Amino acid sequence: MILRILFFFIAIGACSAVLADGFSVKVHTPDRLTEKESQILEEIDCPFMNDSSKECFVTLNLREREITEAYVAQEAVLAFVSGMKGIVFVCSKEILFESDFEGRLTASRMAATFVVLKETLKWLKVGSGKKSFIDGVTIYEAKMRDDSVAYLSYSKVERKVKIPVSEGVWRVASLVADGSGKMRRVFRKGNSIEGTLTPSPVLITPVKTSREYNSESADFWEKEEPKVIHLTFSDASWNNLLRTKKEEYVEADFECSGVALKRVGVRFKGNSSLSMSLREEKFPFKIDFDKFEGQSFLGMKKLNLSNNFKDPTMMREYLAYEVFRNSGLWAGRAAFVKLYISVKGKFERKYFGLYTAVEQVDGEFLRRWFGNAEGTLFKPETFGDDALRYRGEEPRLYGNCELKYGELHPDYDSLIQFTRLIDSSSREEFVKRVGEYLDVESFLKFIAINGLLANYDSYIGTGHNFFLYYDAPQGKFIFIPWDMNEAFGRFTPQGYDFDTCAYVPVLKPVVSMDRSRRVLVERIMKEERWARMYREILARLHFSVVAEKPLVERIEQIARFIEPAIKEEGERRLAEFREGVRQLRRFIEQRSAFVFFELFLGSPPVLVPACGMLVSDEHGSVIYKDSRILFYGSDNNLQNALTMVLPPDAQLRLSKKYLIILAIDEVIRVDRKNYKIDKIMLPIPFSPPPSQKEVSPRPQ
C-alpha cells in the first residue's frame, strides 16, 4: 500500500491541561483578519496565535517562499527531531484561505495541514527523536506521551521501505491533509510496516485495543448513593437559559464530590423531555466543563442530567444502561444525582429533584471501551424511517447521520459502503460481506435487549436514539444505545398501551411505529443460521441479565436508596414513585412470562388484555382474562377454564404441580392436573401503637 494517502489523528481525550512535554505547532499572520476569516480558523481549530515569538521554538517565514504542504510537514518533523519545543509558521493570510466551487471562502488545505500537524505532533515527547536508517531511508524514532514508540519518516523521492515494529495494531498516518482538508490514515496488523515513502511525511504509531479504566471517575459512577451537584448561575445567565430554551450554553459554577469549577457551560437538552418539563421546571441539563475554560470534572468533559421524563420510578434509564453493560455490550454509565441550583439574588440551593446522570458518548467513552478513539462516531437521527438507507456516494447526503466524534478524520466512505451493502447488494453478496462491517452476534444482542426491555423509542421502534461507531482499527460498525428513559414499556408501539406493552412479541425484532422497514434486520433475520442465533441469544439473556427474579430484586434495591431523595420532592412525587415501582415490578413479571411463552411454546393463544396476566413454564401456561383462568398445555391447546374474579393486586406463580395465586389476605392453590382449588387464609398482622413498636436496627 502506498503510504502517501494515509493519516492518523490521536484524539485529545479528556485531558484538561496542556502537555508540557508535547511538541507544539503554531501559526501566525501579521495580516489583519476579518470576523469571517477568524471564524473559519476557529471552526477548524487552527493553531493561530497573535505573537510569533515563542521561546525554544523554530520560526519559519512562509510569506516569500513557494511552499507545499509536504514542505511544511517536513519542516515540522525536522524541528521536532532537533529537540525544539515547537515551530511557528509565519504566513500571509492568503495562504490560509481559498474559495470552494461555489465561490465561498473556506480554510485552505495548508490551514488544514497546520491542524493535522498540531493534533498529531503534540503527543510526541520533545527531545525524544532519534535517527536511524532502513533501506537507505532516514527513520526517526520518537517516544509518545505514554512512552510507547512511534516512527516518523519521509523521502525526497519515492522509496519502498519495510519498517520492523513490535507485533500489534499500527496506524500509518500522513501529516499532510487531503484535498478535502481531512486527515487520512490506515491500520496495519503485524510486526512490520511495508509501503512507499514520499515527500509527505508519515507518522507510525501503535494502537491500543484493550479497554482503559479511568479510576479518576470510578467513584462517581460506581457508588450507587445519589451524588449532590450544585450549580450557581448569575441572574442574567439564568434568565438567558430560560428565555432561549435552546441548545445554547450559559455560564455557571459547578460543585460536586469536593470539586469546584468556575465557568462551566450549561444548557437544556432533549426534545420531549424538555417541552414536557416546562410546567414543573424540572429541566434536563447538559453540562460542558470545557466550554469556556480548559477544564474537566474527574476526567470528563461533559455530563448529561436526565429528568427521567415519563418515568415515575426514576430508575428506568439507570436500569436499562446497567442491563446493556451487564450483557457485555457497549453502553454508557449512569448515576443518581440530587441537583441543587442557586441563582444570585433570587434563590439559594433550591432543590430541583433527583436526576439520572448519564455518561457522554465521546472520545473518553470510546477509549474506555475500545482502548482508543481512532474511529468515527455517528448519531443517526430519523423518526420512523430507516436511518441506514443508502443515499448515494456523497457524504453530504448523509446529513441524518450527525457526526459526533472524529470530525478531522470522518469515515464516510465506510458508512456509504455499509449502507450500500444493506440496501443494494444481492443476497449472496450480503451474506458473504456483512461480517466485514458488522459483528452480527453483537448486533443481534443489541436488538434483542431492546426488545426484551420493551425499549421502543430506539432503533427497533422509532428508528433513532442510538449511536453508530465505526471502529476503524477493527473495521466494524458498533451500535450503542442512548436515551432509554422510556424503556420497560413507557413508549408503546401502535396497538399497545402501557398495560399491554409487556406482550409485544420479541421474535419479530422490529416494532415499527409507521410500518417503515429496518432493512439490515430484515436481511439478517432471513438467514436461518442468524435467525437461530437470535433466538438463542434471546433465551440466554432471558435467563441471565433480564431474568425476572434478580431484576425485580434489583428494582427493590434501587428503590430503597433513591426513595429518600424522591421524598424531598414532595408527597405527591413520592406516591407516584411508589405506585410506579409497583407497576414496574408487575411489568417485568408479565414481560418475563410472555417472553418465556413465546420462546419455548410459540405465540400466546389469546391476546392478554390490560387487566389480564400470563405465567408460563415448560409444562404449559396460564392466562387470566375476563374473570376466567385459562389453562393451556405445552402443545398450546386449551385444557380447562375456571371462572374466578381475582383482586387487582393478585400475582400468579407456577410450580410443577400448582398454579399459585397470591392475594393480600389469602393464597389460592390450583392443582394443574385435576384443577382442585385450595384456599389458605393469611392472618392480617396486628400493628401496635407507635409507642409499643419495637425499633429494629437498620441494616448496615
Image: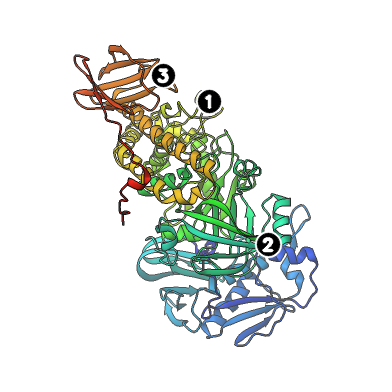
Please report contact status of discs 3 and 1: CB closer than 8 Å, yes or no: no
Q: Nearer the viewer, residue 174 or 25?
A: 25
Q: Which mark is residue 607?
A: 3
Relative vertical location of residue 670 with respect to residue 439 in this rendering, above or below: above
Could you tell me if residue 346 is visible in this image? yes
Query: What percent of the width, then of the height, locates residue 595?
Result: 35, 30
Relative vertical location of residue 335 with respect to residue 493 in this rendering, above or below: below
Picture residue at 51% right of the left edge, 47% below the top: 467
Mark 3 nearby-residue class (10 Å; few <14, some 14–19, many ≥20): few
Label 3 or label 2, whichever lies nearer to me, is 3
Mark 2 nearby-residue class (10 Å; few <14, some 14–19, many ≥20): few
Q: Secondary structure at mark 2?
A: helix
Label 1 amino acid?
Gln
Q: Which mark is residue 43?
A: 2
Q: Considering only order in the chain, which callout, 1 or 3, is on the residue closer to the N terminus? A: 1
Query: What percent of the width, then of the height, locates residue 696?
Result: 30, 51
Q: Nearer the viewer, residue 424 or 304?
A: 304
Q: Considering only order in the chain, which callout, 2 or 1, is on the residue closer to the N terminus? A: 2
Label 3 or label 1, whichever lies nearer to me, is 3
Label 2 amino acid?
Glu
Query: Could you tell whether 235 is left or right of 694 in the image?
Result: right
